[in-house]
Amino acid sequence: MSQTSGFSAGRLTLLGGGNMGGAMLRGWIAAGLDPASVTVVDPRPNDALAELFEAGVHHRTSAPDEVQDVIVLAVKPQMLDEAASQLGAAVGTETLLISVAAGRTVASIEGLLGAHPVVRAMPNTPALIGRGITGAFANARVDESKRALADRLLSASGPVEWLPGEAEIDMVTAVSGSGPAYVFLLAEALAEAGVAAGLEPSLAMRLARHTVAGAGELMIRSTDEPAQLRRNVTSPKGTTEAALKVLMADDGFGPLLTRAVAAAKTRAEELAQG
């Protein structure tokens, strides 16, 4: 596994070796973090982590007995209470806690583990291939050096956007946290529309997948705004313009997506309130 210039996070424990935790761990090692400085606590870690265990990452079924510099909480939200109760001696007063457990507020984490520096983060599933984006909020106990360390760890899976208030996490969840599902649905619907127009299903799906993926990559690489990229594809009185008149109608794609994001934000707020 290739590495770039190394960095140190001290003694780091990853609580939860599932898909997201594993994606973060692979990103850290690829970014140059010493595998031997990391401990994964999980009774049933993802099989894909075997290579990292062989490379020196430690695996335990219970928390380390010594205080850790960083603990990343990457278990499912409903499992966090039980998992956190087992951390015991691993949590010191200056231990940086980074949580990616959706819907679990800083207050709820402090309620479980006490007053600590806490970063609440919302990555999304493209982190699995190092192409995610994360919204993050730090409580007042996170000083400049701890925030820089959290940024280094989180950015191993993609860009990090630091938020001025925790309430914005719910908005980030609705836009980018849930957003990949919206894009996957777009690909599904585009393929189904192609079949309705007369294409063979597997061909329609290949066209849809590559169109969505290619357009996404073009947006990342281009300095143009998405609106300009859309205009670049749209010839006057052409086929794209005819389609966009439907999608951009008063009851079209924009208002529908606005309602969808609002529904996701409301649900995120409900989950955060327990």
Image: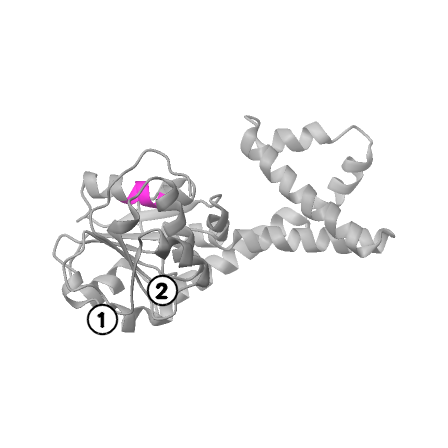
> What's drawn in magenta, residue-wise?
150-154
Q: What is the three-letter code of the residue carrying label 1?
A: Gln
Disc 1 marks which residue?
A: 86
Q: In which quarter of the image is residue 32?
A: top left
| Element at label 1 | loop
Q: Residue at x 40, y 46 (%)?
A: 27
Question: Viewer-proximal residue, 75 or 167?
Answer: 75
Q: Give the image's coloring scheme.
A: one colour
Question: Viewer-proximal residue, 228 or 94?
Answer: 94
View extreme (bottom): residue: 82
Q: Relative to 151, is 66 above or below? A: below
Q: Quadrant of residue 1?
A: top left
Earlier in the chain: of badge 2 and badge 1, it is 2
Q: Relative to 241, is 76 above or below? A: below
| Spot occupied by residue 163 in the image (x, y as percentages of width and height) | 34, 44
Q: How far apart are marks 2 and 1 (CA)?
A: 13 Å
Q: How many C-alpha atoms fall within 10 Å of the one at disc 1: few (<14), some, or many (≥20)?
A: few
Q: Relative to 107, is 165 above or below? A: above
| Element at label 2 | loop
Q: In this view, does 218 lie to the left or right of 267?
A: right
Q: Which residue is drawn at 21% across and 66% down?
A: 87
Q: Is the magenta stretch mostly helix, strand or loop?
A: helix
Q: Quadrant of residue 17?
A: bottom left
| Spot occupied by residue 244 in the image (x, y as percentages of width and height) | 73, 40
* In magenta stretch: residue 152: yes
Question: Viewer-proximal residue, 14 or 193?
Answer: 14
| Spot occupied by residue 268 in the image (x, y as percentages of width and height) | 43, 61
Disc 2 marks which residue?
A: 75
